[in-house]
Amino acid sequence: MAQNSGVPIVIAAAIIGASIVGGSFLIGSSLDRTSQELAGLKIAIGELEIAAPAPAPAARPAARARPDPNKRYTINTKGSPAKGGDDAKAVIVEFSDFQCPFCARVSPTMERIQEEYGDEARIVFKHLPLRMHSKAPAAHAAAEAAHRQGKFWEMHDRIFANQSSMSPEKYLEYAREIGLDIERFEKDVASADVKKKVDGDAAEAARLGVTGTPGFFVNGRFLSGAKPFESFKAMIDAETGDS
């Protein structure tokens, strides 16, 4: 009896061992199938991503319309520097940037207009320092500060004549040359009121659609760029009845 009692134990152990092996096999097979299924899912997702159309590029904002040269615009000239007759038949409003080479180039043309038309033409200056010109804001502040003392055009001419050496130190030098009250000049250059005037002119240019300099309005009619004297003459003569 003692010898045979071990047989059932051996059989039971064999059965348990077989069960463990079988279970391990089943678990392994299940894991393999799961891994294969995951791999297949990744491939499918990748194919979907490749097949999916690329998102459409964002639409470009519509370009701001430039002023219509056949239309007359109303320009606010109150408080702006001006020269020429108060009752001139032709008013030329110039949106200008002191660092713009084309603005400097057209200055002699403005002087010639004054010489030839005298009080029949009035030239009005409006500030438009462009963002690309880092030195322009300080120059416009200096010119506007000089305007507060009745010496805008003197400062205007010196800045344009020395466009290659623009700096606050130079503007202070010009202020002394043209006889400004230096203490008042320095105060005005840094004032919020002067900045408000310059920013206000630039904002008006944006509303009108003027994005580059120089930009002119001859009795409200737009003329873009540093045009030759003859282009201005044709418009002025049409306005004054001299054509």
Image (spheres, helix red, strand yellow):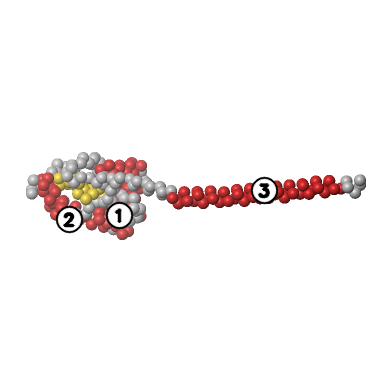
Per the rendering, the mark at residue 228 is 2
Measured as percent of width and height from the top left, residue 202 is found at: 29, 45
Mark 3 to mark 2: distance in Å?
A: 93 Å
Q: CA distance from mark 1 to mark 2?
A: 20 Å
Disc assigned to residue 225: none
Residue drawn at (47%, 51%) of the image: 47
Amino acid found under the numbered disc labelled 3: Leu
Is 92 situated left or right of 101 in this image?
Answer: left
Report the side of 103 relative to 58 (left or right). Answer: left
- Horizontal side of 194 relative to 74 (left or right) equals right
Q: Residue 99's mark?
A: 1
Q: Choose between 153 and 68: the one closer to the eye.
A: 68
Q: Pointer 3: what residue? A: 26
- Who's the residue at 18% across and 42% down the image? 72
Indicate the amino acid at tag 1: Gln
SS under mark 2 = loop
Q: Position of residue 38 (x, y in %)?
A: 57, 49
